[in-house]
Structure formats: C-alpha cells, structure tokens
C-alpha cells in the first residue's frame, strides 16, 4: 500500500508501524515517530496499524540552535 | 551558582549546534569552550542515509547535556508533539520551547507559547521558553510552570545584541530569583558580557559562534566575556553618574595659580 513517509509517497508491504520502520531501513535507528500528526511512542509502534494514505513522520536528532 | 531545574552549571554559555562548517569544528568549539549544554533539534530522517544517527553519536561522544528545541513550530500542537518526540529521542525532560509567530523577526507567538508551556509543564517537562522581554508574558510563563525564562536579546540570527536593555533590566529586577537566559540575537562577546553584567544567569547563542571565521576561538572568546560579565555583576558595579566626579583626591592639592 502507499503511504506518505516524511512527505514522500512510498510503497510498503507491512501494515504494522514497527515492522514498516524495519522495512523502510530504520532498524536500530534512534528516531521518534508520528502518525497522521500524532506522536506514537516507541512502546506503541508494535500494534499500531497503518492504512493506505497514512502519513508517517520519522524524526531523528539534528543540529539546532 | 544558578540552578536550571536543579542542574547547576559551571559554564554559563549554552551553545547551538547548527551552521558550523563541519561536525569536527562544532566538536572543537564545544571542547575548547568547556560548554556543558548544547541545543539540538529533530528533523526528518531518511532510512537510507540516516544522517541524524551520525550527528547524535557525535553529540553523545562530547558528553554534554542536551537541550532539544522545538524550532520551526508555529502552533501549540506542533510544539507539544515535537516536544514529546524530543523527550523520547533525547531522553531528557528539558525542552527549549519555541513557538514562532512571525517570519521576518522569528519572534515568538507568546500567546501560544504560554499555552504550550502550561501543557508541557503539566506533563512533566522542564520548559525553557524562548520569549520576548515582555514582563507580563514572563509572569504568565512562570504561572504556567516554567522555572527558567529565556528572553531574546534581538531577532534570531541577527547579531544585533541587546535591543531593549531597559526591558531586560526590568525583567531581571522584577524576577530576582528566576534563572534568566538571554537567548538569540547575540553577535559579539561584548553583547554577552553586557547581559551578564545586568545579572542574567546564562547566554544561549549559536550563529555568532558558528558563523565566525574561527568558531572554536570565538566560543572561547564568548566564554571569557561571559565569565568577566558575571564576575563584574557579582562584584557589584558602581552607579553611573550624569556628571564627572574627580577620582584623584582634591584635598591637599597645591594652590599654584
């Protein structure tokens, strides 16, 4: 199914957020996630179902002032 | 010694981590200035290049405390959601709360800032709000649960220094026991020294160091200026006068005319 990952349309097979992150290359990465604008803590990723058209934000540490 | 949510800092310079020519130069600036707190942010991470992971490893290796920000957020919801994501990633209750209200000046939307500060404080965050020098807003932020206030000196990245010295003095005098950090607008070590002479507890800056020709040397210069300014404040400066007053004793002077 197609979802939006950080604003870009991508095709994924997995429907579970935790598994989808693995599929998308984020294994063991230090990231925080939001689904359709709502924060999803790491403890709730497994069991959070994705649907076509969902928007995922995956954020990581970056330089800041 | 000033306490920031129970954390006492020896070094009163807090340094941003953006815009340096290279990660190595950033690391050098942090090490040579003995900075104890650096600000960091969150941005979109690609699963293929994973750029944020390398940055985070570098910051962790520096062994400094991190103050995550909500830079770029324009609403309560954006800022609160970003704060939650930052708390998880950086494993800290500290959050530098920015809710931008206007693009030309990047000045905070103080109405949404107070609301976001209340929500986050109630949720256990230790909020460092980026605000203006407005006295009433500072009071509302304290009511909302903030224990530190961070007024701007001037617009972010402008390097103008302290644009409203009277307002900053008023804030200091009105809240003598609240840790106050001048955040944003500082361009030169003399600006930072001036803020410290007024009794501010710390300085948070980024561009003035990152965009210097030699960032590490400039970080050291800021460190020295901040130390000098604080020492001067603690030494209790003299009152200024409108008219001259001779420093050499007049009594005993020869009559030679």
Image (tube, coloured by chain):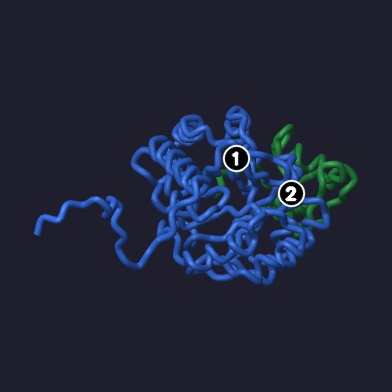
Give the image location of residue A23, x and y in percent: 75, 38
Chain B visual colour: blue
Instruction: In this rendered view, identify the residue nearer to me: B62 or B4.
Output: B4
| Residue B38 % position (x, y) | 58, 41
The picture places residue B246, in percent across and down from the top left corner, at 29, 56
| View extreme (top): residue | B61
Disc 2 vs disc 1: which is toward the camera? Answer: 1
Query: Depth check: B16 or A39 in front?
Result: B16
Which circle marks residue B48 in the picture?
none
> Residue B243 lies in what quarter of the image?
bottom left
- Residue A53 seen in this snapshot: no
Q: Residue at x 49, y 67 (%)?
A: B166
Tell me residue A12's x, y (percent).
75, 46
Quick one: B131 or B26, which is closer to the camera?
B131
Q: Image quadrant for the C terminus of chain B?
A: bottom left
Q: Residue at label 2?
A: B85
Which residue is disc 1 drawn over? B37
Q: Circles 2 and 1: CB distance less than 8 Å?
A: no
Indicate left or right for B38 with B146 as reference: left
Name the colour assigned to chain A in the rendering.
green
Where does the N terminus of chain B fall, quadrant-wise? top right
> How dense is the environment of label 1, judged by Cα within 10 Å: few (below 14), some, or many (20 and up)?
many
For the residue labelled by badge 2, is the local secondary structure a helix, a strand or a loop?
Answer: helix
Mark 1: secondary structure: strand
Residue at x 47%, y 58% (from the top left corner): B185
Q: Residue at the spot x=74%, y=67% of the render? A: B115
Q: What residue is rendered at 74% in x and 49% in y?
A: B85
Q: Residues within 10 Å of mark 2 (few under 14, many from 20)?
A: many
Seen in the picture, residue A33 relative to B23 is either above or below; the reply is below
> Which residue extends farthest left?
B257
């Amino acid at each position: 199914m197609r979802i939006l990952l950080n604003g870009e349309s991508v095709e994924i097979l997995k429907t579970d957020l935790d598994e989808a992150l693995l599929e998308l290359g984020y294994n063991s990465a230090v990231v925080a996630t939001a689904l359709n604008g709502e924060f999803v803590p790491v403890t709730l990723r497994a069991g959070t179902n994705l649907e076509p058209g969902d928007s995922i934000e995956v954020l990581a540490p970056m330089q800041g002032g | 010694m000033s306490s920031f949510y129970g954390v006492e800092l020896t070094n009163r310079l807090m340094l941003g981590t953006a815009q340096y020519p290279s990660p190595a130069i950033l690391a050098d600036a942090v090490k040579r200035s003995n900075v104890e707190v650096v600000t960091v942010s969150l941005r979109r991470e690609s699963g293929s290049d994973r750029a944020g992971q390398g940055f985070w490893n570098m910051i962790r290796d520096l062994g400094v405390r991190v103050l995550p920000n909500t830079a770029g957020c324009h609403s309560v919801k954006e800022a609160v959601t970003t704060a939650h994501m930052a708390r998880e990633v950086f494993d800290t209750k500290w959050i530098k709360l920015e809710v931008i209200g206007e693009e030309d000046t990047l000045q905070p939307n103080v109405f949404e800032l107070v609301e976001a500060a209340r929500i986050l404080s109630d949720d256990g965050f230790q909020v460092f709000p980026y605000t203006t020098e407005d006295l009433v807003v500072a009071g509302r932020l304290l009511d909302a649960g903030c224990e530190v206030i961070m007024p701007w000196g001037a617009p972010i990245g402008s390097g103008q220094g302290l644009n409203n010295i009277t307002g900053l003095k008023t804030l200091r005098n009105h809240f003598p026991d609240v840790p106050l950090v001048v955040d944003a607008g500082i361009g030169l070590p003399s600006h930072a020294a001036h803020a410290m002479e007024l009794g501010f507890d710390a300085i948070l800056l980024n561009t003035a160091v990152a965009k210097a020709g030699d960032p590490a040397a400039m970080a050291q210069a800021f460190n020295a200026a901040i130390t000098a300014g604080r020492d001067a404040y603690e030494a209790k400066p003299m009152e200024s006068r409108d008219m001259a007053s001779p420093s050499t004793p007049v009594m005993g002077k020869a009559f030679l005319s």
